[in-house]
Amino acid sequence: MIRFSVITCTYNAAAELPRTLKSVAEQTYPHVEHLLVDGLSADNTRQLIDQYVADMAQTESLHTIKVKAETDAGLYDAMNKGIEMATGTYLVFINAGDVFPSPQTLETVANAVGEAETLPAVLYGDTDIVDADGRFLRHRRPVPRQGLSWRSFSRGMLVCHQAFYALTSLAKQTPYNLAYRFSADVDWCIRVMKAGQAANLPLKNVQAVVANYLDGGMTVKNHRASLKERFAVMRAHYGLPLTLAMHAWFVLRAIGNKFKS
């Protein structure tokens, strides 16, 4: 039986959090623990979390909820705290503003693994980009390939972080590198996939949209600094020649897109 740890990290997220809590609460899959890690928000975030805990206690849901509220050293530190708390078979990060596409999403992900099948290191799927009102904007591109490996990320982050379900045992071995402020998620995904390869475990595409991602995240708001960090991550994993070639390709693509517009 697969159990999911859904991790939501928050800080002053009162405007975005309700739709995320609703999305997790509506999941029909019963074997879910929802881990909420709050960095001592100064707005109404903690009250929303407390009300969510109280409301869920009045339902027949089998979901469990755990809350940790304390200061942290930023988002990736909070995410490491969530990894430490996780007891599920797989963990996934669904942060404030992000939602599951449907109440059956976690059922779809769990059913992608057969009863006698070796548990994959990673289960992954597609992502849709939505606006602040949850309206569909576009499908995220590029879409993940069937034959994904850690080397695939040399062409960019092919799988959105919210659509990347990591085997918890591997995730606990590979916490986020806090030296990165904007691209630790890319580095983490690569290292989890490397750990899976070392353990001779497959990566599996569930062939479905498994995340709705809120447009305009942290790396979008800090685009230039994020690109510099992304370059450092790629260099660390793939070496300088390939990273330079990849960087040149991204620059040429950006120039081409500018002329198209």
Image: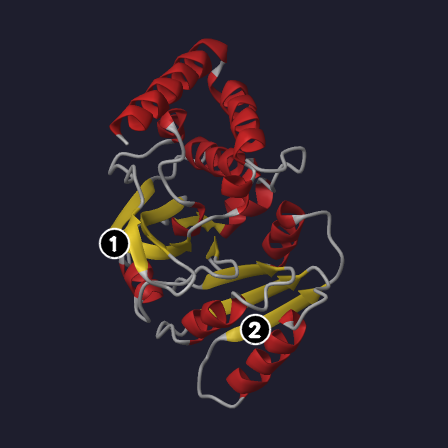
Q: Residue at x 35, y 32 (%)?
A: 149
Above or below, 148 relative to 78: above
The answer to which image quadrant residue 68 occupies is bottom right
The residue wearing badge 2 is: 65
Residue furthest toward the bottom?
58
Give the residue type at disc 1: Ala
At label 2, counting other C-alpha atoms closer than 10 Å, the crowd grade (few under 14, some 14-19, many 20 or more) is some
At label 1, counting other C-alpha atoms closer than 10 Å, the crowd grade (few under 14, some 14-19, many 20 or more) is some
Above or below, 121 relative to 25: above
Q: Nearer the viewer, mark 2 or mark 1?
A: 1
* Quadrant the C terminus occupies: top left
The residue wearing badge 1 is: 208
Give the residue type at disc 2: Ile
Percent from the top left, x then y, of residue 191? 51, 34
Residue furthest toward the top?
241
Tell whether 24 sits left or right of 140. right
Percent from the top left, x then y, of residue 208? 25, 54
Percent from the top left, x then y, of residue 184? 57, 37
Above or below, 9 relative to 175: below
